[in-house]
């Protein structure tokens, strides 16, 4: 794998650059989570970019969030390291370094962020881990399902313990779905329905029950040519007849 990563900033391969090992670990982490190869490389280059600036300043890297924030605040606005447009490149670098900090926190190199978590935090995180590691879903799909499940759990207030959730009726889920999905198209509605069904299937696998709520929110079928109108409007009929009559008056008379 290492042979495929060339660092254009240093003219050396990634493992020979400062923060190169961190960049490689980040790429592997993002690949496992379903990110596109181009995105993985861009975010890895963001880490190499930070390493290059630190190397030029004679600074030895130690995991430090303040160093990253200083780089984003002071270097990126005046950066001339890349040939890419500064605005687009700056966004990619910021996101890549955010992933770097998240990876370092997971590895224990940086302290975890302490925040007040909602009462459903552990439940939703457990479900998302199941989607990633057991079902192998792409990260974009996990994020999509997480959004709808979070909205559902928020709607339940403090009653978000598994035994409280499995005691709901299908009408409770349908009521939430009709409200949340009022402006959703077919695809988004089906994502919402699938996320709720999958969540209750997961609760059932863990022994809480809830199998009776799997499929409580029906999927919407989308038929081919469903958007084609079944009939013409009256205005369209008049326009069609007018075009035919106009064509008749312009036609040459037929000899008897």
Image (tube, rainbow, N blue to C red):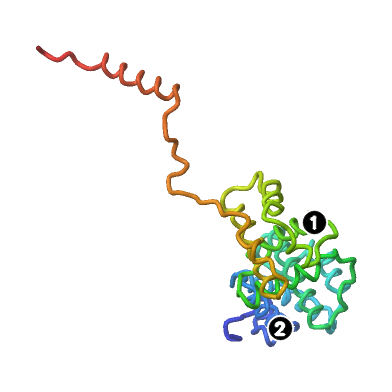
Mark 2 against mark 1, which lies toward the viewer?
1
Does 103 appear above or below 247? below
Residue name at image x 46 percent, y 44 percent: 226
Asked whether residue 122 is in view, the answer is yes
Does 91 appear above or below 135? above
Dot 1: within a 10 Å radius of its alpha carbon, few (fewer than 14), some, or many (20 or more) residues? some
Name the foreground residue: 206 vs 134: 206
Disc number placed over residue 234 in the picture, else none = none
Question: Which image quadrant for residue 229?
Answer: top left
Secondary structure of the residue carrying numbered label 1: loop
Dot 2: within a 10 Å radius of its alpha carbon, few (fewer than 14), some, or many (20 or more) residues? many
Q: Going by the image, does 218 lie left or right of 92?
A: left
Name the foreground residue: 26 vs 81: 26
Q: Which residue is mark 2?
A: 20
Question: Measured from the top left, where is residue 80 in percent x and y?
Answer: 73, 66
Name the foreground residue: 57 vs 16: 16
Question: Measured from the top left, where is residue 88 in percent x and y?
Answer: 68, 60
Name the foreground residue: 167 vs 99: 167
Q: Which residue is mark 1?
A: 156
Q: Earlier in the sequence, mark 2 or mark 1?
A: 2
Q: Going by the image, does 155 lie left or right of 198?
A: right
Position of the C terminus by quadrant: top left
């Amino acid at each position: 794998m290492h042979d495929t990563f060339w660092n254009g900033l240093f003219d050396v391969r990634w493992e020979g650059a400062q923060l190169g090992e961190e960049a490689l670990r980040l790429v592997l982490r993002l690949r496992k989570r379903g990110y596109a190869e181009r995105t993985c490389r861009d975010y890895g280059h963001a880490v190499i970019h930070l390493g290059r600036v630190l190397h030029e300043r004679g600074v030895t890297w130690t995991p430090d969030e303040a160093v990253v924030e200083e780089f984003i605040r002071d270097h990126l606005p005046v950066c001339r390291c890349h040939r890419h447009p500064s605005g687009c490149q700056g966004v990619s670098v910021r996101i890549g370094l955010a992933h770097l900090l998240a990876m370092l926190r997971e590895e224990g190199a940086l302290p975890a962020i302490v925040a007040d978590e909602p009462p459903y935090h552990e439940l939703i995180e457990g479900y998302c881990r199941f989607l990633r590691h057991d079902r192998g879903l792409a990260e974009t799909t996990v994020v999509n399902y997480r959004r709808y499940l979070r909205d559902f759990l928020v709607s339940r207030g403090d009653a978000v313990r598994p035994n409280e959730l499995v005691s709901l009726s299908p009408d409770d889920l349908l009521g939430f779905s009709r409200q949340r999905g009022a402006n959703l198209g077919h695809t988004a509605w089906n994502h919402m329905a699938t996320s709720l069904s999958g969540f209750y299937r997961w609760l059932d696998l863990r022994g809480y029950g809830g199998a009776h709520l799997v499929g409580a929110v029906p999927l919407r079928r989308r038929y081919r040519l469903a958007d084609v109108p079944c009939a013409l409007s009256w205005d369209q009929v008049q326009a069609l007849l007018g075009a035919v009559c106009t064509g008749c008056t312009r036609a040459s008379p037929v000899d008897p």
